[in-house]
Image: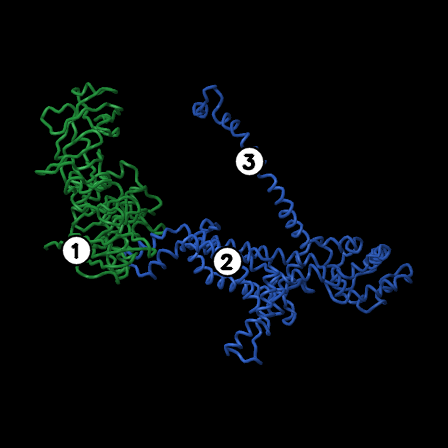
Chain colours: A blue, B green
Amino acid sequence: MSSETKQILTTDGIPLEVSLKKAEKKNKIKAFLLVAPLLFFLIITYVFPIGDMLFRSVDDKMVTQMLPKTFKAMENWDGQELPDEEVFAAFHEDFIKLVEDKREGKLSTQLNYTKNGFKSIIKKLRRASKKFEEGNYKEQIMAVHKRWADVEYWRAIQRRAPEFTGQKYLKGMDMYVNEEGKIVSVEEDRRIHRVLWLRTLEIAFFVTVFCFLMAYPIAHLLATLPMKYSNLLMICVLLPFWTSLLVRTASWMILLQQQGIVNDFFVGIGLVADDNRPEMMYNKTGSYVAMTQILLPFMVLPLYSVMKTISPSLMRAGKSLGGTPFVAFWKVYFPLTIPGIGAGCLLVFILAIGYYITPALVGGASGTLISNQIAFHMKSTLDWSFASAMGLMLLSGVLVIYWLYNKIVGIDNIKLG
Amino acid sequence: MASKKDFVKFDKVDKSYDGKVLVVKDLQLDIAEGEFITMLGPSGSGKTTCLMMLAGFETPTNGEIYLDGKAISSIPPHKRGIGMVFQNYALFPHMTVYENLAFPLRVRKIPKDEADKKIDKALSMVSLQGFAARMPGQLSGGQQQRVAVARSLVFDPQLVLMDEPLGALDKNLRESMQYEIKHIHESIGVTVVYVTHDQSEALTMSNRIAVFNDGKVQQLSSPDELYEKPVNSFVAEFIGENNTFGGEVSDISGGKCKVKLANAEILANPISVKGKGERTTVSLRPERALINPSTKMDNLHKGKIEEVIYHGDHTRVRINLLGNPEFILKVPNSSSNLDIKLGNEINIGWNSDDARALDPK
């Protein structure tokens, strides 16, 4: 009853809420239609590929589908001793079918990811299988190569039974599931990814720091100079944006190489000896220098947009109240720029963490990042699922950073422009 | 404590920003201790520049400013100990009201309990007790303004500068804040230099007003003198309403002069005219001219009513008088003024003492 009395009616006697909804319906449809193209675009170009990537990184159906009977037979196997004839026979049946379809090569590649040594014994098995007699496949297969008589290899096959696997993620962390099913790290001299992850974080962190140190004064100048000078300076800041990334990186190569302009200059002013020119490229230094320069605008712009809104009278107030210029800056100006600092740092860090072309060109062996490794697996080894896994690890890393940032600084405290 | 006549002294101060135009020209100004002085003028007249030079954010191009006998041109702003209220309050948006007020005390290393007392006192002075924990963004414009005033006073400066502090407030609030600032000034006796372009604000609050135009002080005097006895036609025009007649002095004798207009002659009080033949602008306040005066007045002319505007307590009447179609009269709202009708011809009279013959426009 109370709700009835509370309901407000329009002059025509329709409930106000209904009337309001009706009145706003048209606007809502209009608004949705305006957003719709972008929404579809995002779904097609962003949500869908990332979903596909996620799927790919854990998808392990290939082997499951190639050896359906084998895995069925293996269900009863305890994995302690060599499997019995039933498994061997099923494996033979599956294998013959693969050979007919000429797909046994793929199987060998896949199994080789799990354990080295499958490639050659599958090749041998293919040749030998043509002469196989019916029955007692266990003996015949084991006779092809001694590895076929090794229980480790059969366990390796069994590990590929599930349709989904997280092993690519473990591989990305230089870890794997060993024979006992435990997650362990690979041997020290084969750990390549952890180094890359750490290096990626390190380079991204320092590039962010360098960008911040250089961008802060520039942004301040931009925000305080009179219009005609600040426009010119703004163009200088934006100029790199209008130049191809590749061209910029290539020009850094010209500058930084051992016979390059920077080295010539150092030799010219007597800073270094001519026969002792420092290597500034194809190592971390190259990555630092080029990435800092390329990412600088991403730091300058958010800082500038925040600084522009800070009234110059605040600094004056700080000074007139007795604060030295430094105190006025540190207590008044700096805290007000934190939203810009946060936005700039987050932007630069996230961009740097996934940087590819520049480190690939000027980074050399010690200056490449995880994205170069991802590209390597996309283009060279064609292990797309591994590339996807690492891509997703990178993405989740970024999300973690974003989450941390939100915890510490607060995402409301961000200003991109 | 005897108050100093020249607590603040501008001595032959010039200021130019671009080396071509002087924004402030040969400024000579003494401000007494405890005085409330207002720099009044249109925008671009150099008043804010003067304030900024006093605060230390601009340096004089020539000349020197003295504060309490000391030359201050080479002292940076933070060492001058001058309180300042800015146009848009300039409260630190990331600090609470308390922290805003504590800022000048902290940089002076005043112990916390003493600082707290000062902050309490300053907040109660602007009747904002209980607002200490608020952020400036949570306050209304008027409250922010009060915080700004409290902050400029909390460290007991001898001199407070206010740069159009009420410009952003609405009319009613502005008026009440005018009185509030005036009362604060009276109760603590601090010297205030106030900048505004609003003449009524200046007239309400100040002990003395310096009218600025074109980089120069046109007149420096008390509010009543400024209104009653403007020394030149700019001041007469700028302060209050003003009726003018442009003409030529035809005779001058015995503290009176005759001014020949296009088709008439009026009697006026010679202020800045010296002799016959000079061009002059005669200035007359609207309330000094009467309709059908009952007493004898030495100027009496006929005019035609062109427009009548009802203002409640008074009526403004625009009259075409002696070739000036913009002659304004203020008629108090009383039953005696019945013949004020559009198109009527009426007699208007004024005393020649009130008609000031000033420099020509």
Q: Which secondary structure, mark 2? A: helix
- Give the chain letter at badge 1: B
Instruction: Look at label 1 and name its amino acid.
Output: Phe
What residue sits right under mark 1 in the picture?
B7
In the rendered view, does A138 fall on the left or right side of A401? right
Between disc 3 and disc 1, the foreground one is: 1
Note whether B161 is above or below B299 in the view shown.
below
**Label 2 sits on what residue type?**
Cys
| N-term-proximal mark, 3 vs 2 | 3
* Residue A321 at x, y percent in the picture: 28, 56
Q: Is residue A8 above or below residue A137?
A: above
- The answer to whether B265 is drawn above or below residue B44 in the figure is above
Q: Give the quadrant of residue A219.
A: bottom left
Which label is found at residue A31? 3
- Residue for point 51% across, 26% down: A18
B247 to the left or right of A220: left
Residue closest to the eye, B18 or A48: B18
The amino acid type of the residue labelled 3 equals: Ala
> Disc 3 is attached to a residue of which chain?
A
User: What residue sits right under mark 2 in the picture?
Assistant: A236
- Name the chain under label 2: A
Which element carries disc 1, helix, strand or loop?
loop
Query: Pointer 1: residues within 10 angstroms few (<14), some, or many (20+)?
Result: many
Residue A228 appears in view: yes
Residue A284: x and y in percent read 57, 69
Residue A299 or residue B192, whichever sits in front: B192
Q: Nearer the viewer, residue A51 or A24?
A: A24
Marks 2/1: CA–CA distance? 49 Å
Q: How many marks?
A: 3
- Depth-wise, is mark 3 or mark 2 nearer the camera? 2
- Quote the CA–CA distance across marks 3 and 1: 65 Å
- SS for callout 3: helix
